[in-house]
Image (spheres, grey):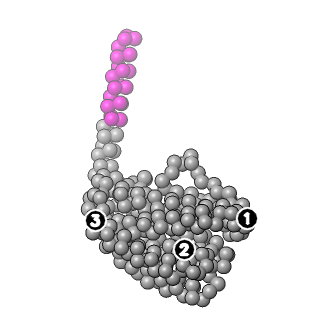
Amino acid sequence: ASEAMADEGIGDRNKHEEQQHKSHAGHSKQHEDSPVISENFDSMFRKDGTTWGSKSYPVSTVEEPEPLDIVTKSIAQALVTVLKGSLDWYYHKKSDFARFFVLETVARVPYFAYMSVLHLYESFGYHDRAHWIKIHYAEADNELHHLLIMEALGGNKEFSDRWIAQHAAFAYYWFCVTFYFLHPRGAYYVMSLIENHAYHTYSKYIEANKSWLASQPSPAIAKEYYEGGDLYLFDAFHTTRAEEQERRPRVQSLLDTFESIRDDESQHHRTMLSLVERGRP
């Protein structure tokens, strides 16, 4: 009798496990047939990298995009060369802080443009890029604080610099919206070049002025931003580092401030490059 009861218990347990397995299989099948909202910024691009997919297209199954075509790269490089050359020509005898003020005013614009287009897609029901909006907002917030630091250093005191920065930003915004709408990876590639240029610009400035920068105090806005208690947005744009490698800059001098800004630009460059090469941050 004991053996019969044991056999009956084993049979019931096997039947229960079989039912659980069928239930799990059905659950998995249901997920295979449904749109997948990626939790790790999977690609929103189809293989050619120029279209956005559809509401019924599983995001996590999209292949990594093909390498960016040489024509797009050449146009982007030419555009950045012209922008860089124009800025360097006009500001080679003017204040470095004024040049940085213009650079940071314009640097925020593409992130505004990306968010505008992504919000438009959300209006049409494409909700699988909410994380992208958060990242671009965090990047724009970071560039805002770079701008506030340059203003604190007097970079915006001349009317001509303010006029150039504002009008350049207005024109560049509409260019970025159009380019991002038509070819998002191309737009990200342009931004990767600009952020890389910003990184090297700050690096050269630091090397040429290290002693003087080390002797100057850090602006209050820099200490508030980099050492403040709420670093949620600061952490949000760090997409290419391990979670255990948190950046916590200490800004005691102007040298520390510019080194932190330089390192921010490096992070932006890596994020943009990842979007170009992998189709995700």
- Mark 2, secondary structure of its residue: helix
Closer to the N terminus: mark 1 or mark 2?
A: 2
Which residue is denoted by mark 1 in the rendering? 215
Query: Could you say whether the residue bearing mark 1 is in a helix, strand or loop?
Result: loop
Other-residue count near label 3 (Cα within 10 Å), few / some / many at <14 / 14–19 / ≥20: few
Task: Reply above or below: 213 against 17.
Answer: below
Who is closer to the viewer here, 234 or 124?
234
Name above or below for residue 7 compared with residue 225: above
Which residue is located at x 46 percent, y 62 percent? 269
Give the CA distance from mark 3 to mark 1.
Answer: 46 Å
Residue 8 falls within the magenta-colored stretch: yes
Residue 123 rendering spot, x and y as whole percentages? 39, 72
The three-letter code of the residue at mark 2 reads: Glu
Q: Going from the N terminus, do you reach mark 3 or mark 2 first?
A: 3
State the residue at coordinates (35%, 71%).
Answer: 76
Image disc number at residue 247:
none
Is residue 240 visible in this depiction of the protein? yes
Does the image show residue 118?
Answer: no
Which amino acid type is marked by label 3? Ile
Tell me residue 272's x, y (percent). 43, 62
